[in-house]
Image: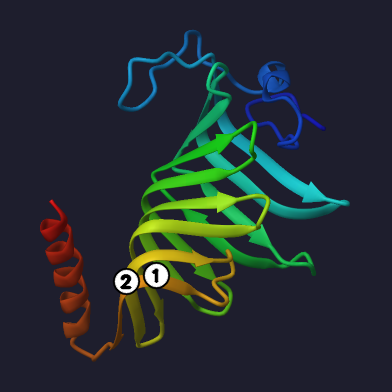
Amino acid sequence: MKTKRGKAATLLVCAALAAAAVSCSQSERPQRSLGTSEMADQEFSDFKTMESDSGQVKWILEAPVARVYNIRKLLVTDNPRITFYDENGEISSVLTADVGEYNQDTHDMTALGNVVVTTKEGYTLETESLIMLRELGEIHSEDFVKVTKGNDILTGYGFQGYPELKNVDIKRDVRAYLRDEEGLIDGEVKKEKKGKGSGDE
C-alpha cells in the first residue's frame, strides 16, 4: 500500500481503508449516509484508490467524496468514476454513477443512479444499477439496460457481461433498434422503459 499526504490519497483496496485516515482530507465530524441516519466513521475528499494484480492496474476509482462505514465494512463514494484497464495497460472502459459502494469483505463494487459505461470501441451502457463481481471480473444488473453503438440500440432487462462490454448478455424483454436521424427511436426506448416500469408497479 502507498499513500500520499495531502487532500488526495492513493491506496490498494486490498489493504485496510482505515489506514488512509492519516493521509486523506477528513471532515471535522462524521456525515450522514444518503437515505439513512447512519453516521460515517470517516470521510475523505478527492478520494482515489486502485486494484492491481501482479503489478498490473485493473481499475482506478476516483470520487470527490468517500465515506467509510466500519460496521458494514462499506466504502460509499459520491459521483464515482471508475477507469478499467486491459492487459496492455490501456483504458478499456470508464464507468460513472451518482453513488458507488465498495464492499471491503468481498471487494465487489455497486454503482447506483445514472450508471453509464463507455468503452474504447464506442459502446455505451446505461442503467440504474450495476454490480461488479471481483471473483468473476463481471458486471451485472437486474434493471432496464440500454446498450448503444452508433445507430444500433439494444435494450432489455437484466444484464451480464464484462466492463469492456464484450459478449453482452441481456436476460429478458430484449429489443433491437436502429436509430434514425430525428432520434425517434430514442423516444420509443424511453417509452419502453417508462411503460415497463409502470407495469411492474
Q: What residue is rendered at 54% in x and 58% in y?
A: 139
Q: Is residue 127 left or right of residue 89?
A: left
Between residue 110 and residue 62, name the one nearer to us: 110
Q: Is residue 169 left or right of residue 50?
A: left
Q: Quadrant of residue 170?
A: bottom left
The location of residue 16, given as percent across then percent down, is 72, 25
Q: Quadrant of residue 163?
A: bottom right
Would you say the residues marked 1 and 2 are in contact, meaning their CB atoms lie under 8 Å apart? yes
Between residue 72 and residue 2, name the one nearer to us: 72
Residue type marked 2: Gly
Secondary structure under badge 1?
strand
Q: Residue furthest right?
A: 54
Q: Earlier in the sequence, mark 1 or mark 2?
A: 2
Mark 1 surroundings: few (<14), some (14-19) or many (≥20) residues within 10 A: few
Q: Quadrant of the N terminus?
A: top right
Residue 171 is tagged as: 1
The location of residue 109, given as percent across then percent down, is 55, 44
Between residue 138 and residue 48, name the one nearer to us: 138
Q: What residue is rendered at 78% in x and 49% in y?
A: 52
Q: Is residue 48 above or below residue 144?
A: above
Residue 156 is tagged as: 2
The location of residue 180, given as percent across then percent down, is 24, 91
> Whole-Å distance between the Cαs marked 1 and 2?
7 Å
Q: Is residue 13 above or below residue 88?
A: above
Q: What residue is rendered at 34% in x and 81% in y?
A: 153
Mark 2 surroundings: few (<14), some (14-19) or many (≥20) residues within 10 A: many
Q: Is residue 1 left or right of residue 62?
A: right
Secondary structure under badge 2?
strand
Residue 147 is tagged as: none
Q: Is residue 110 left or right of residue 20?
A: left
The location of residue 62, given as percent across then percent down, is 58, 43
Q: What residue is rendered at 33% in x and 71% in y?
A: 172
